[in-house]
Amino acid sequence: MEKLIITAAVVGAAPTREQNPNVPYTPAEIAAEALQSWRAGAAAAHIHVRDPETGQPAFERHLFAEVVERIRAESDMLINLTTSGFNIQGPDIDGQRLMPLDLRPDLCSLDVGSLNFRSGRVFINPEAWADRAAREMRQAGVKPEIEAFDLGHIRQAKEMVKRELFAPPPFFQLCLGVPWGAEGTLDALLDMKRRLPSDCQWAAMAVGPTQLPVNTATILLGGHVRVGFEDNVYLSRGVPATCNADFVERIVGLARVLQREPASCAEARQILGIHQGM
């Protein structure tokens, strides 16, 4: 079976130090978490940034740039920058969301459908946004990580694949357990997987206590996995993780038991069709 790409999603937009005191806030802390995860076996880091003082979600170029610089100074890790931009305001919000392309990451997240969150927020991703993001990412030589929170998102992305908006192979991230998207269950994972195009690469993540079961099933099904504080701050029930590398180390051990060897950064680039330095 193909080698396993492990992505560490080291902070996200939601976890706080009130939930787990080890959640990183500053660019130096975020980069350090990514590098520790790389040493533990992760080939990629999915990056959000925070206000270093308050810990609130942020989307400033200089914060992303410092994280990217610090990671690249010490590793060949694949860098995946978010374009979710929940708190962006003002004119041309879509253009502002694509600012991370200027930093030439290996990947950027691309959310192809809207979703109601249980917190009362609506994650708005119109069709025009998805098409523009796909075109500009391809022009910039950045691989889209197509984030799908429900079945309709996969349907939309498959139509985009037919229009050749993505360089092959398209790379899907199945996002499970997020209210009110697809449930974090094996049935939901199988429903989503069977609807993927046959010539794609795919990974899956799930939040909270659904993280480990979905990770395990994904390894067995031949997909890649995402772990980290963005999705879960507990290593087990009532036991906070000390760092993102805790999750990576557990997945590395589990993968080897299940006869999936973790991919190196170079192998991950080959699997995803990413050329370093693009």
Image (cartoon, grey):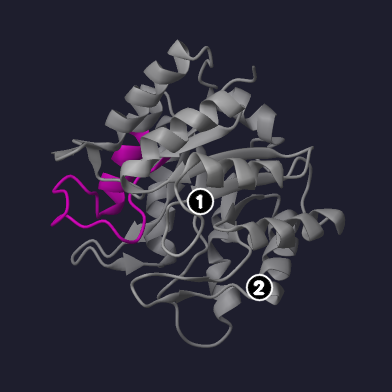
Left or right side of 150 for 12 = left
Residue 69's label in the rendered image is none
Nearest the viewer among 262 and 153 is 153
Q: Label 2: how many residues lie within 10 Å, few (<14), some (14-19) or many (20+)?
A: some
Q: Which corner quadrant holds the N terminus?
A: top right
Q: Position of residue 36 (x, y in %)?
A: 32, 30
Seen from this angle, which residue lies furthest right?
A: 163
Image position, residue 69 (x, y; %): 43, 45
**Percent position (x, y) of residue 204?**
52, 41
217 shown above or below 93: above
Who's the residue at 50% across and 30% down the image?
Answer: 217
Q: Is residue 249 above or below residue 110?
A: above
- For residue 197, what is the image quadrant? top right
Q: Nearer the viewer, mark 2 or mark 1?
A: 1
Percent position of residue 16, x then y: 21, 57
Whether residue 76 is visible to the viewer of this picture, yes or no, is: no
Residue 239 location, quadrant = top left
**Residue type at numbered disc 1:** Cys
Image quarter (top left, top right, bottom left or bottom right) of the C terminus? top right
Residue placed furthest toward the front: 187
Rendered residue at 31%/43% (across/down): 209
The residue under label 1 is 175
Depth order, front residue of 63/154: 154
- Give yes or no for residue 84 being in the magenta stretch: no
- The residue wearing badge 2 is 129
Answer with mark 2 or mark 1, whichever residue precedes in sequence: 2
Q: Is residue 208 visible?
A: yes
Quadrant for residue 234, please give it. top left
Residue range (magenta): 8-35
